[in-house]
Amino acid sequence: MPTTITPEQATAMVREALSAIAPDADLDGLAPDDDLRGAVELDSLDFLSFVEKLSQRSGRRIEEDDYEELRSLSSCVAFLSHR
Amino acid sequence: MRWQTIAKEAPPAGPRVWDYAEVRDAFSWEQARAGLDGLPDGRGLNIAHEAVDRHAAGPKADAVALRCVDGAGVTDITYGQLRESTNRFASVLGGLSVGRGERVFSLLGRGPELYTAALGTLKNTNVFSPLFSAFGPDPVGERLRLGNGRVLVTTPELYTRKVAPIRESLPELRHVLLVGTVGEGTRIPGGIELDSALAEADPGFEIPPTDPEDMALLHFTSGTTGKPKGAVHVHEAVVAHHATASFALDLHDDDVFWCTADPGWVTGTSYGIIAPLTRGTTLVVDTGEFDARRWYRILQEQRVSVWYTAPTAVRMLMRRGADLARDHDLSALRFIASVGEPLNPEAVVWGQEVLGLPIHDNWWQTETGAIMISNYATMDIRPGSMGRPVPGVVAGLLERGKDGRALVTNGRVTESSTPGEMGELALRPGWPSMFRGYLHDDVRYAKMFAGGWYLTGDLARCDADGYYWFVGRADDIIKSAGHLIGPFEVESALMEHPAVAEAGVIGRPDPVAGEIVKAFVSLRREQTPSEELRRELLAFGRRRLGGVAPKEIAFEADLPHTRSGKVMRRLLKAREMGLPEGDVSTLETAQ
């Protein structure tokens, strides 16, 4: 059973994962509900790497059914910290 | 053989039943041309007339041509409405005095405006050149310059991000037609709001006389060295679009057809715009990016009957599992085809098991303009094979020389006749959608032909029954997620970074994308490798190149070189794949 992840830790994980894949992205300018794929310009392959990195960092298995929970910064944080 | 042939003894309901050998032997392109109307009063042949006007003038006027699906819902555009919007677009270009043969570029996401622009451009006898909207400023600028872009159709947002930084290098670009509202304070030289221009334009437009050999489309493709090449296609290409839509995609006028390729790539223009419209089909246009659930929903809700997609997308759907597919009603679907890179046998069989239909692989290139080798609705599938040549197309395999390409001796080549032997895939020139040149580069065009063949640069085998099997590229071109990416263009962009001395770019094999772009860079003497610098280079690549930027960057102090000083990409690839470096000739078979 993984330990709980706080929203702050989840935010940091998402930001780390995004900046590893798209270091050109302006993460400070990202609004909590922005669509990540559009705002950070992630193509489908980038998005798969993003999920992999989130999974590694959080220690949680992310099923493909969960992808829709990973649309924005705020939904990612909710997903990682509320389980 | 490990994979069992998928027999088509009882063809599923719907497809036109035809015997491959019989049709192939009786086929002529002249006959195929007779299936089209031509411009009235013998004024020639124009793609837009065949795709739009001839349907709009008949019983299909109120049939849906485009069904645009976005987050807000579904917008239907009939053939009649498409005739009017494309007339208006042609009138706008005419009003701007854009001359015959001048190039109109688009840098747009998939939406109604893109289709209006493409077909309206063709009506005004200008040349349409689509750009992939995920390109960064470097590839956008390079293509606009090489193609002498006179008009660009884009959005204010895309302009600001991708064109404004390079606008000064585009003196030939005169007009920028803008989809959407231009914000106050945004100054775009030559900018015209498209909506209001269309509203004021004449909805009546007569297509001027069009010679079938007039330039119609300009598609850029990547080379291993030098700049991208602009492959020139002419209006006569529509004969091949129309014929192959029937042979390879089995399209009928009552089909709902979805081609998932972006019109920024050749598939998205030939089969995402032209071919299905010439057949009077309803075309589904999805504005979004890949998303498994939404894709299944589109197939279900739009009752898609024929679906043309790419191996990378199929493999992503496979990862998503069978349950999601089974949660959807895919009963309208009757034919699935795929193109972009070889479709692995597992994917063909997965289609059969999970979607209830096998996936039909086919093969063609930017230069060929249309599908050349294909699996057909009524022909048995040998999973992993790209199928057999389209009627009217003559293919062959040529023996290779030391450089891996077809061996040319005194202008002659040797066709290999032993079944199963690997050779360079070649085609006999003469099909209507063959490219007519590389813009401004006759030398490179001439090099694509030898001994009466067009040399494709792809390696393949052919079995005793005439089925072709893709082996790999004979050169260093990267195939990632169905897109051709030239290593030189990526290397050049990276070398503009002050820390980089040299770069070698390869396609690293990847289970989902086929290959992903990986760059090896050597640094200037005063620089030291660090994680920070690696990220900076990734960011630099993404800013310059957009969607074709390297996904991985590795530092390599000593890049291997040929005697002439070029980076040996094949050796880098052999190392990456753990192959013996001395035997790089095995590279292709290992893929």
Image (tube, helix red, strand yellow):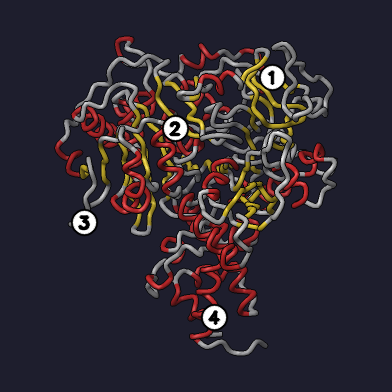
The residue singled out by tag 3 in the image is B183
Mark count: 4
N-terminal label among 2 and 3: 3
Residue shown at 48%/58% (left/top)? B294
- Against B185, residue B85 (above or below) is above
Relative placement, left or right, of B408 versus B78 is: right
Q: Chain of mark 1?
A: B
Closer to the camera, B289 or B264? Answer: B264
The picture places residue B414, in percent across and down from the top left corner, at 77, 16
The picture places residue B179, in percent across and down from the top left corner, at 27, 47
The residue singled out by tag 2 in the image is B253
In front: label 2 or label 3: 3
The residue singled out by tag 4 in the image is A80
Label 3 amino acid? Gly
The label on residue B21 is: 1
In front: label 1 or label 2: 1
In front: label 3 or label 4: 3
Q: Are marks 3 and 1 in contact (CB under 8 Å)?
A: no
The picture places residue B586, in percent across and down from the top left corner, at 82, 39
